[in-house]
């Protein structure tokens, strides 16, 4: 992109409605976090996953070798364009569709990051993160159930019904 970093942060470029001003989106996310309406585990894991994929596998032509500055510019361009930050603040933390346990939220964020970068790399929509959220939402309850089962296995906790029978 031929847009300066300040223009990207302030939203002085053509972007989907509501997704351009990164500074305002980050302020909204900070407000929601301070109000205890969102937890950062899903959002941070989503953003870190997207940043790692953009750094390791840049989409821009001519980025080969170990030019760190150019790779970091690719990360900046991926995170500050499209609906990545908007989704990290508002869509991923939806309490009814996100996983409820901490490790489940981290896995949820990583999966949404991988799927959304797949949509961005191989799809035609820069806002493919919305489709990724819908796809991963379909397994968020399964992630929660699996995490509870793994926690019981690792900590040797009886199932909820077994403790009741033992007490009788």
Image: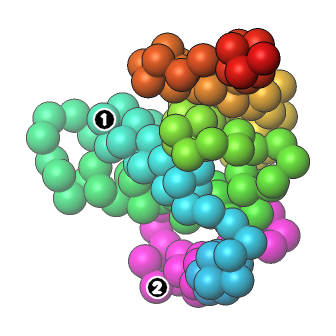
Identified at 71% across, 21% down, the residue is 167
Identified at 74% across, 72% down, the residue is 37
- Residue 166 x/y as whole percent: 69, 14
**Separation of marks 1 and 2 at Cα, in angstroms:** 24 Å
Residue 130 sits in which quadrant? top right
Q: Quadrant of the C terminus?
A: top right
Residue carrying label 1: 56
- Residue 138 x/y as whole percent: 83, 25
Residue 113 visible at all: no
Question: Start and end of the magenta stretch?
Answer: 1-26
Q: Sequence-wise, which precedes: disc 1 or disc 2?
A: 2
Residue 152 located left or right of residue 93: left
Q: Compared to 88, does 165 lie above or below?
A: above
Q: Secondary structure at mark 2?
A: helix
What is the tally of numbered marks visible in this picture?
2
How many C-alpha atoms fall within 10 Å of the one at disc 2: few (<14), some, or many (≥20)? few
Residue 22 lies within the magenta run: yes
- Residue 48 x/y as whole percent: 42, 49
- Front residue of 128 and 42: 42
Residue 20 visible at all: yes
Residue carrying label 2: 6
Visual colour scheme? rainbow
- Residue 69 x/y as whole percent: 20, 58
Residue 100 lies within the magenta run: no
- Front residue of 115 and 97: 97
Identified at 80% across, 55% down, the residue is 94
Residue 90 sits in which quadrant? bottom right
Q: Secondary structure at mark 1?
A: helix
Which residue is most to the left? 66
Residue 148 located left or right of residue 137: left
């Amino acid at each position: 992109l031929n847009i300066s970093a300040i223009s990207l942060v302030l939203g002085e470029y053509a972007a989907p409605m509501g997704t351009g001003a990164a500074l305002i989106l980050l302020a909204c996310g900070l407000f929601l976090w301070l109000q205890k309406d969102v937890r950062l585990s899903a959002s941070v894991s989503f953003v870190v996953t997207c940043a790692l994929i953009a750094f390791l596998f840049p989409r821009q032509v001519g980025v080969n070798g170990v030019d760190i500055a150019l790779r970091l510019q690719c990360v900046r361009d991926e995170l500050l364009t499209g609906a990545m930050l908007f989704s990290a603040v508002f869509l991923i933390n939806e309490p009814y569709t996100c996983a409820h346990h901490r490790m489940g939220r981290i896995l949820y964020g990583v999966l949404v990051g991988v799927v959304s970068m797949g949509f961005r790399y191989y799809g035609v929509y820069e806002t493919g993160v919305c489709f990724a959220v819908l796809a991963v939402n379909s397994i968020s309850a399964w992630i929660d159930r699996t995490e509870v089962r793994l926690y019981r296995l690792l900590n040797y906790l009886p199932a909820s019904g077994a403790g009741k029978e033992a007490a009788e």
